[in-house]
Each structure stands twice: as C-alpha cells, then as structure tokens.
Amino acid sequence: MTHTCIRPTAHLAGATGFTALFLLGSAGVADASCVAPPTTSASSFTGTVLATQDKDRIAQVRTDAGAEVTVVGTESPGANSASSVDRTFLTGARYEFHPLNEASPFRDNACTATRQLTAKANPTAAAPELPRTGVPSYLPVTGLLMLPIGAALTYRFRPARRATS
C-alpha cells in the first residue's frame, strides 16, 4: 500500500480557493436587503427636495401641489445608526416618491419605487463625489472573516508528523 503525503501548501491553496469562491459568490448588500421588487404606493407624489438632514436620509420636500412635507428615508434616524435599506436624497433634485404611509412625515426606504427624476437645480454647489473603487463594501469584511476559517482548515487538514526513531 502506498501512502501519499499532501503538502501543507496544497491545503493552504485549497482553503484559499474556497475563500475566493465564497467571496465571489456572496450576495451584495442591496441584493440581500430588498427581497421583493420595489413597492409602489397609493400615496405617491412628486416634489423637489429643499433641504436634507441626518446624512441626507431625511428630506424637506415641496410637492408639485405646493405642500411642504417631510420624507424620512431611514427606519433608525440618528447620527450613529444606519441600515442597508436607508434611502438618501439630493438637495435640489426632483423625485417621484412612493412612501410607505399616507401622511407627513412620510416613511421611505431603498426598497420602494421612489426614484429621482431630475438632477440638482444648481450643480455648481455640489460637493465633490468620492471616486468609486469598484470593490463592494462587504468584500473586505467578508475576506477578513474568512481568514481564520482558512487558517483553521489548513491546520485541521495538515499532514500528520511521522515519529522519528
């Protein structure tokens, strides 16, 4: 009977390959948050965002009918809170809103059919936008979580040491 010894580097390569497959096959944040297609609302309206607060998640809006309303794009307002379905608004932009409720303050999130219709009224006042790196936000965290798993798999499946006489 022959015994084949697999080198530790083969296990490391296998664990690395498993990690790469896991990272490439992971769902994105938005994919996991909004399970159903965007929901429309019987209380839909159009309007222009006059001002924002709470990291652009709460908007003061003048509707096309002339009313001033508040649209809250988060379930948890506050400086130290956020969720994967938070909606942000752009001051000066016109939107078609599809809120979750029927009166101001309207509740909205990224899973509704709310959409931006026009850009800002004054594009010169825009703050510079950070360049997109193309790396999904969950990738570094998932990679860091997979490192100990890969190390544990490599340790677990290492070849047994032979006793020397």
Image (cartoon, rainbow, N blue to C red):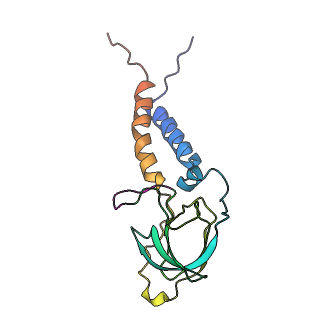
Residue 67 locus on image (x, y percent): 54, 79
Q: Which of 97 and 33 is in front in this view?
A: 97
Residue 94's place in the image compared with 42, above or below, is below
Identify the residue at image location x=40%, y=28%: 155
Going by the image, does 34 lie left or right of 142?
A: right
Identify the residue at image location x=46%, y=29%: 7
Q: Can residue 35 be seen in this view?
A: yes
| Quadrant placement of the N terminus | top right
Magenta region? 78-84
Going by the image, does 161 lie left or right of 120?
A: left
Residue 26 locus on image (x, y percent): 56, 47
Residue 138's place in the image compared with 129, above or below, is above
Q: Residue 161 colored magenta?
A: no
Q: Name the quadrant containing residue 159.
A: top left
Q: Which of 65 and 162 is in front in this view?
A: 65
Residue 106's place in the image compared with 2, above or below, is below
Residue 153 locus on image (x, y percent): 45, 30
